[in-house]
Amino acid sequence: MQLSVVILAAGQGKRMNSDLPKVLQPLAGQPLLQHVIHTARALAPAHIYVVYGHGGAQVQSALSHEPVEWVLQAEQLGTGHAVMQAMCVIPDDHTVLVLYGDVPLIRAPSLQGLLASAEAGALAVLTVELDDAAGYGRIVRGADGRVSAIVEHRDANADQLRIREANSGVLAAPAGRLREWLLGLGRNNTQREYFLTDVVAGAVTAGYCVDSIKTARSSEVLGVNDKIQLAQVEALYRRERAEELMLAGATLADPARIDIRGDVQVGRDVYIDINAVLIGTVRLAAGVKIGPNCMIINSQIEAGTEVFANSIIDHAVVAENCRIGPFARVRPDTVLHHDVHIGNFVEIKGSEIGAGSKVNHLSYVGDAQVGSSVNVGAGSVTCNYDGHNKWPTIIEDRAFIGSGSMLVAPVRIGAGATIGAGSTITHNAPDAELTLTRAKQTTVAGWTRPEKQNVDAKAATIDAALTPPKK
Ligand code: UD1
Ligand code: CA
């Protein structure tokens, strides 16, 4: 049976006190609504309808890349009214699943039972047992134990308020029947709204089966209404992702101090120290070690590589047994072959570095093609930018770049070439030879260091030095 998912996202989210619509508030760096759409997509539905209202244009543009259909609910007349807006375009023979833009932790496996019930013709509601169900609709059951109605907190009597089984809001039903029950909704409640929850009573009256499925993980149905709940959901999300990594074989120094914002896969015996931030698609192969305070973005790191404290690796591919950092920055479009060492305060951008090469201290290598077994000495720079254009540098196998060298691109350093320390290289350096530039060293005989001047003498010196010459 074909599935249509309806995601309710028209609410304003007043309690966020934010210019950003509630469903765009970030969870793990992505809008809340994005997470819900992601879950919906995992169910392979025929259509995903997002019912929007407040902040419509902003919400649509933030999620314009998603394959969803947007349905406007111009006036927020209740959850039942919101679902009704989408029903006009959903065929009778579909199954409808209702999700919420502000309930982001729901996962596809928890929805399978609900969908199976709905496909068998029932109205299926997802419920949750809560110690404190204040604010939630309560699941009311008849003498036979079956669900007979959902009563909103504000409309509940004293007996009903004692019920701890709460309505998560998530439900599924055959589209044709849901439409009939929705058409039967009234606004006979304290909020004068069309309540989606009232379809339960409608189904019971019409003699249809109402199934309830209690979720085992109450966190999955947590709603986000304010920044406190947003932080709680973020912590739960972080914990879940951390547990996935640990189950896959990673050792985490502290599962509460890792941020996983994307799709991260780890091999066996990966070790991740505190405060790692992993963003986008990240692959850490077996035995990779990540030191404290590292950020890894859309990168792949092969087995045995070690990244030391405070390093950033962004859109890079790193092969086996490399050593990176501490305090290294590996920028986009960088490829490091095996056994490469990138040391402290080194920045690499858009470069390929061959096996066994070392750039260990205080260097910038940009737009460079570096061969294998190359040594780039401390403080060397590929001068790749002339103010308008970026130019490439080629350093061939086994070259040795002396400390403090400026390689002015475009330039080629030949295989096995040696560049003398402190050289400014503007022409290609031949293979296997020593190339260097030298200013002549001089010693000024009898020179003495300046003495400390008083305030007035110092001011006079500055005036004399900085006054422009008269023409
Ligand atoms: C709803 C349920 C309640 C359940 C609770 C779970 C109803 C009547 N009540 O209550 O049983 O326990 O969720 O969190 O359904 N929305 C629209 N358009 C509207 C109204 C709401 O899109 O006209 C969206 C809101 O943006 C929100 C969601 O629907 O994402 C729920 O609406 P809200 O008013 O928060 O319902 P609750 O009172 O929390
Ligand atoms: Ca709510």
Image (tube, rainbow, N blue to C red):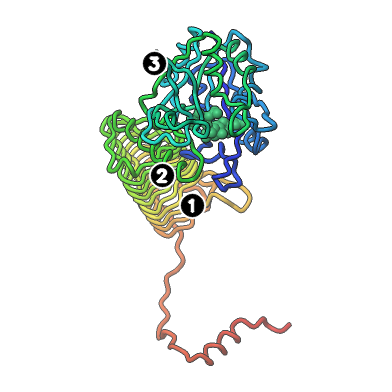
Q: Which mark is residue 253?
A: none
Q: Which mark is residue 407?
A: 1
Left or right: where does residue 411 sit relative to residue 471? left
Instruction: Identify the amino acid type marked 3.
Output: Gly
Disc 1, SS: strand
As displayed, is residue 336 above or below residue 40? below
Q: Residue furthest right?
A: 471
Residue 431 placement (x, y as % from top left): 42, 44
Residue where numbered disc 2 is placed: 295
Does ligand 1 reach within 8 Å of label 1's beta carbon? no
Residue where numbered disc 3 is placed: 145
Taking depth in this image into account, of 362 and 315 the one nearest to the observer is 315
Instruction: Identify the amino acid type marked 1.
Output: Leu
Left or right: where does residue 108 sit relative to residue 78? left
Q: Are marks 2 and 3 in contact (CB under 8 Å)?
A: no
Mark 3 or mark 1, earlier in chain:
3
Residue 193 occupies quadrant: top right
Q: Quadrant of the C terminus?
A: bottom right
Residue 297 placement (x, y as % from top left): 45, 39
Q: Residues within 10 Å of mark 2 (few under 14, many from 20)?
A: many
Disc 2, SS: strand
